[in-house]
């Protein structure tokens, strides 16, 4: 089930398990999603202007969205995956 959910990402099973552990650490209130503030508590993303802008579009990230979001930053991500993130960014700025 989990592998099927993330088949279109550049993330492998071991990374998904690791990301789930990290997601649970960031989800301080155990509500099943992390807020932009919780996400930006990770220094690597707090310093990334793209992640800051993209997070302004959402109230929070559930685990699936968290993995998809991070997948676009993965060096192994395909061009279509990176383009998908770019399209979301462009649509946001046209609103």
Image (cartoon, rainbow, N blue to C red):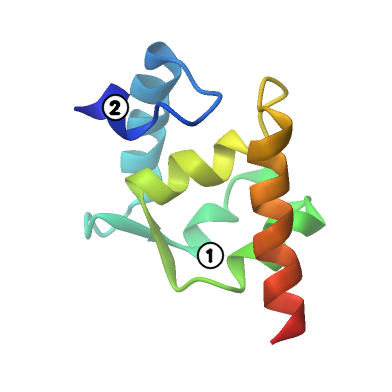
Horizontal and vertical percent position of residue 93: 76, 78
The circle drawn on residue 4 is 2
How much space separates mark 2 and mark 1, taking CA atoms? 29 Å
Quadrant holding the C terminus: bottom right
Tell me what residue is drawn at x 80 percent, y 58 percent.
49
Tell me what residue is drawn at x 32 percent, y 57 percent.
33
Quadrant holding the N terminus: top left
Horizontal and vertical percent position of residue 15: 45, 19
Picture quarter containing residue 25?
top left
The circle drawn on residue 91 is none
Tell me what residue is drawn at x 64 percent, y 50 percent.
84
Q: Is disc 2 surrounded by few (<14), some (14 to 19) or many (20+) residues within 10 Å? A: few
The answer to which of marks 2 and 1 sits earlier in the sequence is: 2
Horizontal and vertical percent position of residue 94: 75, 82
Look at discs 2 and 1 and give the one toward the viewer: 2
Relative vertical location of residue 13 with respect to residue 55 in this rendering, above or below? above
| Closer to us: 15 or 43 | 15
Q: Is residue 6 left or right of residue 69?
A: left
Tag 2 secondary structure: helix
Picture quarter containing residue 91?
bottom right
Q: Is disc 1 surrounded by few (<14), some (14 to 19) or many (20+) residues within 10 Å? A: some
Tell me what residue is drawn at x 71 percent, y 64 percent.
89
Seen as rendered, the residue at the extreme front is: 80
Tag 1 secondary structure: helix
Instruction: Count every numbered label the image shows and give the total.
Output: 2
Relative vertical location of residue 3 with respect to residue 31 in this rendering, above or below? above
Q: Is residue 10 left or right of residue 24?
A: right
Disc 2 to disc 1: CB gap under 8 Å = no
Seen as rendered, the residue at the extreme bottom is: 95
Residue picked out by circle 1: 37
Horizontal and vertical percent position of residue 24: 31, 41
């Amino acid at each position: 089930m989990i592998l099927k959910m993330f088949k279109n990402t550049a993330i492998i099973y071991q990374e998904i398990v690791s990301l789930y552990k990290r997601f649970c650490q960031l989800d301080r209130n155990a509500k099943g999603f992390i807020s932009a503030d919780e996400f930006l508590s990770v220094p690597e993303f707090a310093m990334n202007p793209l992640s800051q802008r993209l997070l302004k579009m959402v109230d929070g990230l559930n685990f699936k969205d968290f993995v998809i979001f991070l997948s676009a930053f993965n060096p192994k991500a395909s061009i279509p995956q990176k383009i998908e993130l770019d399209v979301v960014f462009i649509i946001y700025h046209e609103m």
